[in-house]
Image (cartoon, rainbow, N blue to C red):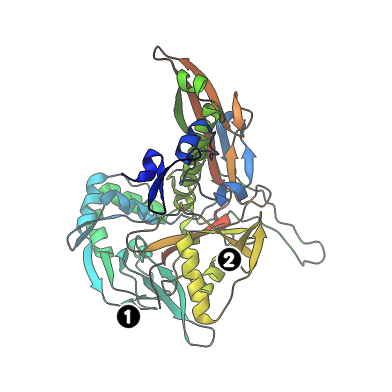
Amino acid sequence: MSVGSVGDEVRAGRAVPQQSLGTAAARNLATTTKSVPQMQEISSRWLLRTLPWVQVKGGTYRVNRRLSHAVGDGRVTFVQTGERVAVIPAELGELPALRGYDDDDALAELASRCRQREYAAGEVIALRGENTDRVHLLAHGRVEQVGEGPYGDEAVLGVLADGAYFGDASLVSEDATWEWTARAATACTVLELTRADVLNLAERAGSLAGHLAEYAALPRRRTNKYGEAAIDLSAGHVGEAVLPHTFVDYEASPREYELSVAQTVLKVHTRVADLYNQPMNQTEQQLRLTVEALRERQEHELVNNREFGLLSNCDYGQRLQPHDGVPGPDDLDELLSRRRGSRMFLAHPRAIAAFGRELNRRGLAADTIDVDGTRITTWRGVPIYPCDKIPVSDAGTTSIICMRTGESEQGVIGLHQPGLPDEIEPSLSCRFMGIDEQAIISYLVTAYYSAAVLVPDALGVLENVEVSRWR
């Protein structure tokens, strides 16, 4: 035990009595200066701050669109057992020719007829101009769509990744040919289903034969380049030409977005609320941290929810693959070129760092802008906002989101319903639920929200971006 601990101190080798009050004792009479409760989970939440919010009366938002006749693309899902990969039978319904076909036995047999093939990087899977006699289901890897450039040189038209398919026209047409060469950019695992196998099963399964015949006989109404029913117009004519008659058709069953909810019950003991409310109100601090957690969950859902989240609701025609794995300026340029009026990128901080490394490697520099006192990196004048809610896989890959926003711009919008009873923030309420027999006060804290993509090209995603590669 030290001498000072019993009120004495050593001076010049002898003990003398303490002459003033020690700091440890003085603290018993002092009021400490303290911070409000801190919370590491709180992030910048740029998505919530920048997304335009539209008031939804009645809890449902309907997106009316012009009638589209283009068959939507889909992703095929697989299961893996060791080195063996198999397609889930129901997932074959993602192929346009089999969309809506629900004979489980026939789909199971088709799935069993898929043959697994392994392709090395650089190996050609299908050659441009040759007859298409099978559909390829890409279980894993990246495949380049190679065509001829304007000067006769080779050009990469696009990149396909896990879950993609190609050659599906062979299921309904024996005259289909490859319009481009499919070449493995990495080692690829591909399942192949031949036209002969499909026709062989159709001879025994009348439902499959009827479905394929019905699909082949569907009228091919004229469409614009976006797949929407064409509007007949006449321009540049002279004299008394007969003008075409037309109308604008709408989708018969437009998509509706219902507001989602995040809720929790906050409990505070009356003894705490009564006796320990100075200098800070305990209930207010408990509610503040609860609201922060709800807002964090709200942003997470807006990005990842399978019903309305941005990553799940991006049209497959707007999903791109990086040309070299790492996110480069060429990839972001390609993402911007897919839509007009892009207002923002959204990327995990590690993806932004990887993009910065690629710029440094090329000797380029990105501009920055000031947003509410924070310097934000931009590319082509479009800000790249950090969002840690975008997942990063164990393999070190993530996604970068690009979108046009605003209802008037046919972009991406947030949905909420302000004006709730006991509202403390727009579309977030705190309702008193009473005091139980244990003297605990309960409050119901609720947030309502959703998001809507008004037209498919409002949202684009650069997938499988590598953030762990250093070079």
Quarter the N terminus occupies: top left
Q: Nearer the viewer, residue 309 or 244?
A: 309
Q: Is residue 273 above or below residue 214?
A: above
Which residue is found at the position 57% from the left and 78% from the top?
A: 364
Residue matched to label 1: 122
Which of the pair 178/33 is nearer the observer?
33
Q: Position of residue 170 (x, y in %)?
A: 34, 65
Percent position of residue 163, x then y: 35, 60
Task: Pick the quarter of the image with the C terminus.
Answer: bottom left
**Height in image: 203 above or below 333?**
above
* Visible residue check, residue 264: yes
The amino acid type, in three-letter code, at marker 1 is: Gly
Badge 2 amino acid: Leu
Q: Nearer the viewer, mark 2 or mark 1?
A: 2
In front of the other: 309 or 427: 427
**Left or right: 344, with 127 as reference point:** right
Residue 441 visible to an observer of this rendering? no
Label disc, if present, on residue 336 of the rendered structure: 2
- The x and y percentages for residue 295 are 52, 40
Task: Give the camera-side residue of 341 and 97.
Answer: 341
> Left of 321 or right of it: where is 431?
right
How would you rate the neighbour count of disc 1 (Cα within 10 Å): few for under 14, some for 14-19, many for 20 or more?
some
Q: Is residue 18 above or below residue 77?
A: above
